[in-house]
Image (tube, rainbow, N blue to C red):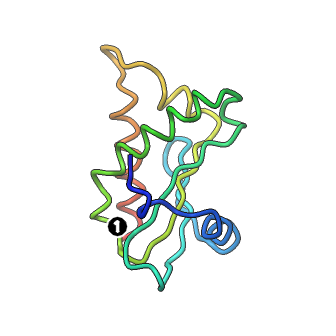
Amino acid sequence: MLKKKNRVDRKTIDKIFKEGRFINGENNLVFKFIFNKNSRIPTVSFVAPKGVCKSAVKRNILRRRGYAVLEKYLKDLPNDISGVFIFGKKSLKLFAGRKHKNYNPNTHLEYEIKNILSKIN
């Protein structure tokens, strides 16, 4: 889990949704962001809307997995960025299932996040 200082607050999230630019991932993950000149550290959050799943437990699984993966790549982000990763409707099937021989959702989510972050720089 990311530290509180590295997560976006509600006011900034509203500003991101109004003014932000976005980058689409390959599979149901969108990164919406702004460059915040007042910020000295990168702040990023994950949003799993109710359209993904009605169950809060499953939406929290998605968010926690996202934070766990992003923690590795936080130092690669520009210092003045504030952004939100938004999960799409098929994200539950792609990123929240249990891993087995043929498919690991954590690896798939990590690939998706790396791909999006490479487009920022």
Which residue: 58% across, 43% down?
87
Quadrant in which the N terminus is drawn = top left
Q: Which residue is mark 1?
A: 77
Residue reaching furthest to the front: 4
Q: Quadrant of residue 92?
A: top right
- Seen in the picture, residue 6 relative to 78 is either above or below; the reply is above
| Mark 1: secondary structure | loop
In the displayed structure image, the side of residue 29 where residue 42 appears, left or right: left
Quadrant in which the C terminus is drawn = bottom left
Which residue: 41% across, 46% down?
67
Q: Quadrant of residue 55?
A: top right
Which residue: 50% across, 30% down?
94
Residue reaching furthest to the top: 101
In this view, the residue in front, 113 or 36, is: 36
| Residue 54 position within the rendered picture, expressed as x and y whole percent measured from the top left | 71, 29
- Counting every numbered tag in the picture gives 1
User: Callout 1: 10 Å neighbours few (<14), some, many (20+)?
Assistant: some
- Seen in the picture, residue 44 relative to 2 is either above or below; the reply is below
In the displayed structure image, the side of residue 8 where residue 79 appears, left or right: left
In this view, the residue in front, 10 or 101, is: 10
| Residue 102 position within the rendered picture, expressed as x and y whole percent measured from the top left | 33, 17
Residue reaching furthest to the bottom: 37
Q: Quadrant of residue 12?
A: bottom right
In the displayed structure image, the side of residue 94 where residue 109 appears, left or right: left
In the displayed structure image, the side of residue 65 where residue 31 appears, left or right: right
- Seen in the picture, residue 6 relative to 52 is either above or below; the reply is below
| Residue 45 position within the rendered picture, expressed as x and y whole percent measured from the top left | 51, 55
Instruction: Specify the amino acid type for callout 1.
Output: Leu
Which residue: 57% across, 64% down?
9
| Residue 91 position within the rendered picture, expressed as x and y whole percent measured from the top left | 56, 34
